[in-house]
Image (spheres, rainbow, N blue to C red):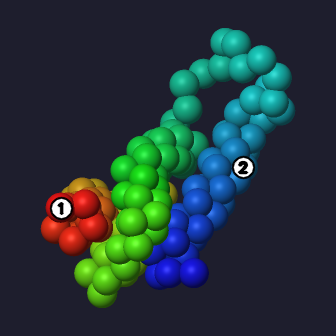
Amino acid sequence: MTVELTMLVYATALLLALVAVQATAGLRAQGLPLAHSRDGLPAPTGLHARMLRVVDNHREGLTLFAPAVLVASFAGVSTDATALGAQLFFYSRVAHAVIYMLGLPWIRPVIWLVGIVGIGMILYALVTTGLG
C-alpha cells in the first residue's frame, strides 16, 4: 500500500476515534438523554461543543483528501511530493484535533492550513503528472 493510501486509512481511523471522544464528551456533558431522541437538549458547551466542531472539521477535510488520494492511486501517481502531502494532511489533522480539544487559539488555523497545503500537493501532482 502506498504512503498516500496508508495516510487515508489513518485519517479514517482518526475520524472514528474523534467520533468516539465526541460521543463520550456528549454523554459526560448531557448524560443518558443524549442516547434518546435528543429533543430539547441544551446546546453543547465546552469540550462537547469543541468535539462536535472537530469531528465536522475533520469530516470536511476528508471529503477533500480522500478523493485526491483515491484518484492518485487509480492514476498510479505516487511521488515523494504526494507522499509528503498525505503525511502533512494526516499529521496536521492529529495536531489540529489535539489543539482544538485543548481550546488553544491562534495556532489552530495555521495547522489547518498545513493540511490544506498537503492536499494541494497531491492535487498539483495529479494535474502536472497524472492527469495533465
Q: Which residue is mark 2?
A: 24
Residue drawn where x is 52% and y is 66% of the image: 8
Residue drawn where x is 70% and y is 53% of the image: 20
Q: Which label belongs to residue 132?
A: 1
Local secondary structure at mark 1: loop
- Percent x, y of residue 51: 53, 48
Does 86 sit left or right of 129 as displayed? Answer: right
The amino acid marked with disc number 2 is Thr
Q: Which of the image's four quarters has the C terminus?
A: bottom left
78 above or below 54? below
80 above or below 82? below
- Percent x, y of residue 62: 45, 52
Give the mark, 2 or 1, whose residue is nearer the N terminus: 2
Q: In the image shown, does 36 or 72 lie closer to the viewer?
A: 72
Q: In the image shown, does 52 or 16 lie closer to the viewer?
A: 16
Mark nearest the camera among 2 and 1 is 1
